Amino acid sequence: MTDLTVNDRPVRFEMDPQTPLLWALRDAANLTGTKYGCGVGDCGACMVLIDGAALRSCLVTLAEAEGRVVTTIEGLSRDRSHPVQQALVAEQAIQCGFCTPGIAIAAAALLARNADPSEAEIKAAIRNLCRCGVYPRLVRAIQRAGRVARRAERISAAPSPGITAEDAAAAVPALRADP
Ligand code: FES
Ligand code: FES
């Protein structure tokens, strides 16, 4: 058994401790926002925050995650209100969306340590692969998210999230308030 905190909730996984965290999140916790792309650490689709750092969950075992605080895209905000999520939508920096959860996690980690990143800093920090090629819009979106995080701008064009925390918890057991 492996105990960790996932999206602010204590979670116990009764799985082989060598199971990749990605499989545990997707298959056991039903947190399918975290995507399986390459499985070998190249694409970043599987990124989650572990103790605040954006890491590739396909390369982290449950044993390595023991006792740590994990945040998936579902926990970045319960209603898609995180500045990165709002800016990605407002800048239309999403095409098929497969890479988007991992990019949002990487961008959130970047903005947490640098809320005003340059284009070069964004390109250096966000190494995620996007087969649709959203890269130019991505830079604009992350810089805009930084302005929102610094309260230098509000995004009013982004659509209403359209889901409540309670609705999300109904679909994803790991997001429920009570075990
Ligand atoms: S699935 Fe983990 S880096 Fe690609
Ligand atoms: S939006 Fe399609 S892979 Fe990035």
Image (cartoon, rainbow, N blue to C red):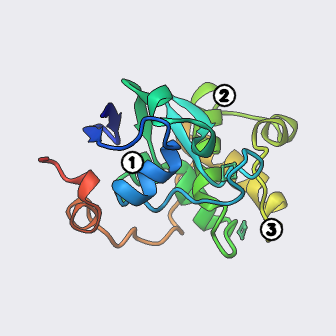
**Residue highlighted by disc 3:** 131
- Residue 173 seen in the figure: yes
Q: Position of residue 110 (x, y in %)?
A: 65, 34
Q: Is mark 2 within 8 Å of ligand 1?
A: no
Quarter of image, res 124: top right
Identify the mark at residue 114; answer none if there is no mark.
Answer: 2
Which residue appears at 57% of the width and 36% of the height?
60
Number of on-image labels: 3
**Residue highlighted by disc 1:** 75
Q: Residues within 10 Å of mark 2 (few under 14, many from 20)?
A: few
Picture quarter with the N terminus = top left
- Which quarter holds ligand 2? bottom right
Give the label, 1 or 2, closer to the camera.
1
Q: Earlier in the sequence, mark 3 or mark 1?
A: 1
Give the residue type at disc 1: Gly
Q: Is mark 3 within 8 Å of ligand 2?
A: yes
The one of 135 and 67 positioned closer to us in this rendering? 67
Q: CA distance from mark 3 to mark 1?
A: 25 Å
Which residue appears at 70% of the width and 65% of the height?
93
Q: Residues within 10 Å of mark 1 (few under 14, many from 20)?
A: many
Q: Secondary structure at mark 3?
A: loop
The one of 129 and 116 positioned closer to us in this rendering? 129
Q: Earlier in the sequence, mark 1 or mark 2?
A: 1
Give the residue type at disc 2: Asn
Q: Residue furthest front?
A: 16
Q: Earlier in the sequence, mark 3 or mark 2?
A: 2
Q: Residue furthest right?
A: 120
The one of 109 and 21 positioned closer to us in this rendering? 21
Disc 3 and disc 2 in contact, CB within 8 angstroms: no
Q: CA distance from mark 3 to mark 2?
A: 26 Å
Give the label, 3 or 2, closer to the camera.
3
